[in-house]
Image (tube, coloured by chain):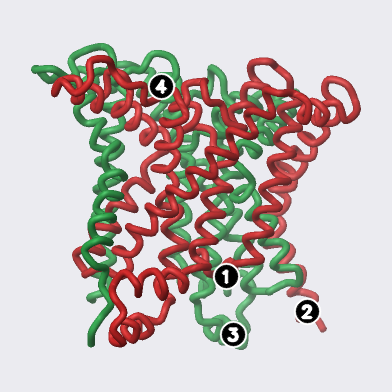
Amino acid sequence: MPTYRPGPVSLALAVLVALFLLLPLLAVIPVSLTPSRMLTMPTGELSLRHYRSLIEDPRWLDSILLSIRIGVVSSLLSTALALTFSLGVWMFQPRFTAALVGFVLLPMVVPPVVSAVTLYFLLTSVSGVSSIFGYDTWLGVAMAHSVMTVPFATVLILVSLSQLDRRIDLAARGLGASVWERATRIIMPNIKFGIVTAALLSFVLSWEEIGVTLFITSVNAITLPRLMWMGLRDNIDPAIAALSVILIIITVLVLVMRSVVTRRRASA
Amino acid sequence: MRGTLSDRTGAALLMAPLLLFLVLAYAWPFLGVVKWSFTLPTPGLGQYGALVSDPLVQSVFIRTLRIAAIVTVVSVTAAYAITVVWVRGSPVQRVLAEFCILVPFWISVLTRAFGWVALLSNRGLINTWLQSIGFISEPLTLVRNEFGVVVGMTHFLIPFAVFPLASAMRSLDERVLLAARGLGSSRMRTFWTVFVPMTRSGIIGSALIVFVFSLGFFVTPAILGGGRSVMIAELIYLRIFQSPDWGLGAAISVVLVIFVGALMALLFRHVRPRQLV
């Protein structure tokens, strides 16, 4: 059967766009190898000193550990909240479902800067009541990140629920299973891939969150993006280039692995 | 009867935690921000009056709209070019296009903005290269201006523009294209008179998404604009943390939400949400 394929003009334009998309990611590689203390192209000799400073400078290590801690806590919270909510929607199909889901998706739709001002208001108000949960605390940041990631987790779990066959739940119900049993033994095992994806996406979104974090931290809760931001704004530190190269390599590896796994699944 | 009652309790129990969390941690503080806009520094509509009369605020709004419009046109066009190959190309072309779209998509906004700084700054890759081949003697100013902001934002938003376009292109009936070709229409003509009009909903969806995203953009303009081409989001940040003028920052936020809400309403009148994913 003949197929409609893009012609040479389309291909040429697509190649230009592809180059534009990859260029800034490739550009950080030479910069990360510069022997200079400033952001320059290396001339002649190459050096790994900026990679070494990532391990030796405690500021980088501290912020990496903090980002992991915040990412894990906020991902667990937002996945748990998204899961219970989605189970309620799917099992009981209550009235006003569309409005309730719309409300849950708001932090994803509202411009991030407005969410940032909103969470700034929340955390500065909380600061007056509790010092461990408020402005510039890691728990405050984790809670704020959960607000921002919970819509994405909800969408992913609702999508995987929508592909589930309702009849298996009806059968369980007909055989006398309780709501708890239906949820934990029938539905959740069937959407575990969706739940894990939601948790991973929430973690990644929290790990790289900067728009909101900038508004709700100052000197204590310095996450990795926050530290990168400080290094980018004032005097550009080439250690950021080294860190960027590492993050890009991790991303490429994960994407390649994922595509290999999906291809295996499809062919199996 | 007992069934429906327990159904309701069950649904309420399961849905309550998230709804409660978002009411307390999002809806309530948002109302607080709205309150700020009417009460700080003095009660009344003063902040909204300042929005209309302050020439600085106005110039930032106009610049934001202009940059958002340019970025929308450029990113949707570029996204269209690569989406055609992602959806309709040969298997190898598809894998390569997908790689070029997804890798930047998953890399953080900071890393991507930094990549552009490394390319475009005075001692960056492009200026170093142009000077070494003797094409220019003084470095070109490519960042800390609107050009840098447009380039960085376009780069960030192309992957987002791709998804609605891809779903429109996937759902189109290939036989219509083959029929046009079979009836003797040239490649160019088939593309412009059949293919593009049939992906109209995708183009509208993708343009609105990019435009809405551009309006509230913070990180890329702040880094690549270098404080010289301030957009709305950065203005809000400056008003809250540097001036500090919380009332004005809050008022700008409220106006931005209303504006984006109106645009989203427009979006959902044109395309059903399903078509966007």
The residue tagged 1 is A183
| Amino acid tagged 2 | Thr
Under circle 3, the secondary element is helix
User: What is the chain letter for disc 3?
Assistant: A
Residue A267 located left or right of residue B205:
left
- Marks 1 & 3 on one chain: yes
User: What is the chain letter for disc 2?
Assistant: B
Q: Residue at x 66, y 59 (%)?
A: B266
The residue tagged 2 is B4
The residue tagged 3 is A170
Return the x and y of residue A245 as percentages of the image width and height: 26, 33
Alpha carbon separation for disc pair 3 and 2: 15 Å
* A143 up-or-down from B42: above or below: below
Q: Residue at x 58, y 36 (%)?
A: B64
Return the x and y of residue B114 as percentages of the image width and height: 36, 29
Alpha carbon separation for disc pair 4 and 3: 56 Å
